[in-house]
Image (tube, rainbow, N blue to C red):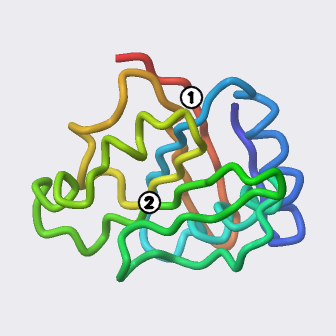
Amino acid sequence: MQEIFNSVDQLPIVARKLLDTFPEERFFAFFGKMGVGKTTLIKELCLQLGVEDNVCSPTFAIVNSYCRAEGDPVYHFDFYRLKNVDEAYDIGYEEYFYSGEYCFTEWTEKIEELLPEQYVRVDIEENNGIRTLIANLKND
């Protein structure tokens, strides 16, 4: 899947397309430079999934858990502040990653070796205000 967009107003369409392209997948690993819009897109994905909680970056908490309207959790990770992969073990990443619930990860490159066998890799690049999103199913 590839999407090109240049406005936050387009995010509902991009998020819906991402979820519809991978309807059975629950793990989405985001890659992209700081400020490219990973958190903003994850906020929209959560809205599309019926999350009623306030969605914000878990930079300091590392993981935020949000509640969907029907009660199912959505997990949002930001691994930016991790000093090493052992800190992911300390938060019990496996319980989240293998829960079968939606998981969205930012700064995934810091824990890439811990990713599940199958996940959606979402790369976002920005060039002069135009963002390109490329999403592929990975099955290592």
The numbered mark, 1 or 2, whose residue comes first in the sequence reads 2
Q: Residue 83 falls in which quadrant of the image? A: bottom left
Residue sitting farthest toward the front:
71
In screen coordinates, is 14 left or right of 28?
A: right
Q: Can you identify the residue that label 1 sits on?
A: 136
> Residue 134 occupies which quadrant of the picture?
top right
Residue in the picture at 81% in, 72% down: 8
Q: Amino acid at mark 2?
A: Glu
Residue 9 lies, in percent from the top left, at 89, 70
| The one of 132 and 42 positioned closer to us in this rendering | 42
Along the line of sight, the residue nearer the viewer: 63 or 32: 63
- Along the viewing direction, whichever of 107 and 97 lies nearer the viewer: 97
Give percent across and percent down for residue 50.
83, 57
Extreme residue toward the top, this view? 139
41 is higher (above) or lower (below) than 34: above
| Local secondary structure at mark 2 | strand
Q: Residue at x 83, y 58 (%)?
A: 69
Assess disc 1: are there few (<14), some (14-19) or many (≥20) residues with their C-alpha within 10 Å of its C-alpha: some
Drawn side of residue 2 relative to residue 117, left or right: right
The location of residue 65, given as percent across then percent down, is 54, 64
Badge 2, how many Cα within 10 Å: few under 14, some, many 20+? many
Kindly indicate whether the residue at mark 2 contacts the one at mark 1 (C-beta within 8 angstroms). no
Q: Quadrant of the N terminus?
A: top right
Q: Disc 1 versus disc 2: distance between alpha carbons?
A: 16 Å
**Which quadrant, please, contains the C terminus?**
top left
Q: In the image, which disc is placed on residue 106?
A: 2
Q: Would you say 49 lies left or right of 124 here?
A: right
Disc 1 secondary structure class: strand
Q: Amino acid at mark 1?
A: Asn
Q: Nearer the viewer, mark 1 or mark 2?
A: 2
